[in-house]
Image (spheres, rainbow, N blue to C red):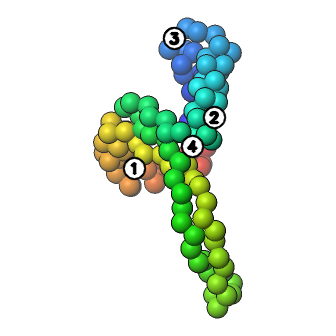
Amino acid sequence: MTKRDLVVRISNETGVVQQQVLNVIQKTFDYISDAVAKGETVELRNFGVFEVKVRRARVGRNPNRPEKDVPIPERTVVKFKPGKEMREAVIKISPTDLKNQRNGDAME
């Protein structure tokens, strides 16, 4: 689902003009992004939590030259932890159904 799909769906269900729906969705995403960029945790009940975590420094390997170590520095990353309802809904999806759905989308 794309942002455009979301806008069309909400507009059709609510009767609100698509441009207004787009503005609200974009502002929502902007505020979430701004908060996470400041290192804040964004918790959306029944949906999930966006938070900033620090990935520790580690040593990587170049698959083309495995004898040479590549230092990977410590960095910050955004993590998303789905809420209980989303987690339970995803658990119900069988891996086979998901593969079939993705293959069907690729053929269209």
Indicate the secondary structure of the residue bearing disc 1: helix
Can the viewer see residue 104 in this picture?
A: no
Nearer to us: label 3 or label 2: 2
Residue at image mark 2: 34
Which residue sits at x=65%, y=13%? 20
Percent coordinates x, y for residue 62 in the rendering:
66, 80
Give, as a three-letter code, the residue at label 4. Answer: Gly
Percent coordinates x, y for residue 43 in the rendering:
44, 34
Q: Residues within 10 Å of mark 3 (few under 14, many from 20)?
A: few
Task: Please give left or right for residue 72 compared with residue 80 in the image.
Answer: right
Residue at image mark 1: 97
Label 1 – label 2 distance at C-alpha:
36 Å
Give me the disc on residue 14: 3
Q: Residues within 10 Å of mark 2 (few under 14, many from 20)?
A: few
Give, as a three-letter code, the residue at label 1. Answer: Asp
Q: Earlier in the sequence, mark 3 or mark 2?
A: 3
The vertical placement of 66 against 101, above or below, is below
Give me the disc on residue 39: 4
Q: Earlier in the sequence, mark 3 or mark 1?
A: 3
